[in-house]
Amino acid sequence: MSQSSTFIDGFDNVTLVDGVVRLDLITVAQGAANTQPVPTKVGSLALPIQGFLRTTEQLNQVIARMVEQGILKRNEPTPAAAPAIEAAVDAALETSAKAKPTKSA
């Protein structure tokens, strides 16, 4: 079995459909002079909700260790950001619920 590593700068286009969280993997490169950096999709990742939650918990544990070690300083979200975050989560959950097939009796 061959193993490979992929460097990414982050995620883009995170969706939840039929209980699967899908994330586009991106790198960011500087375009022409005086232009904005350009994100480029280099792959994708699909996780069932439980796998996504386990991954999120593991990442939160790593962040907590980095905060304890002084590598990072935790910033509290601004009060204005909270409604936008909640709305995005609600929209993703609503989209997922609509996408699920219904069972007929």
Image (cartoon, grey):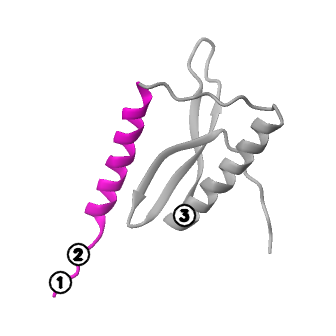
Residue 51 lies left or right of residue 17; in this view the side is right
Q: Position of residue 70 (x, y in %)?
A: 81, 31
- Magenta-colored stretch includes residue 20: no
Query: Which residue does the numbered mark 1 point to in the structure image?
Result: 104
Which residue matches tag 3? 47
As helix, strand or loop, the secondary structure at mark 1 comes to loop
Tell me the crowding category of disc 2: few under 14, some 14 to 19, or many 20 or more residues within 10 angstroms, Cα based: few
On residue 102, the disc is 2
Q: Earlier in the sequence, mark 3 or mark 2?
A: 3
Q: How many marks?
A: 3
Q: CA distance from mark 3 to mark 1?
A: 28 Å
- At a point 38% along the width and 67% down the height, the residue shown is 18
Q: Is residue 104 magenta?
A: yes
Residue 72 position by quadrant: top right
| Residue at 47% from the left image edge and 48% from the top image edge | 14
Kindly identify the amino acid type of the residue bearing the numbered disc 3.
Leu
Q: Quadrant of the C terminus?
A: bottom left
Residue located at (41% from left, 24% from top): 80
Q: Vertical placement of 90 versus 46: above or below?
A: above
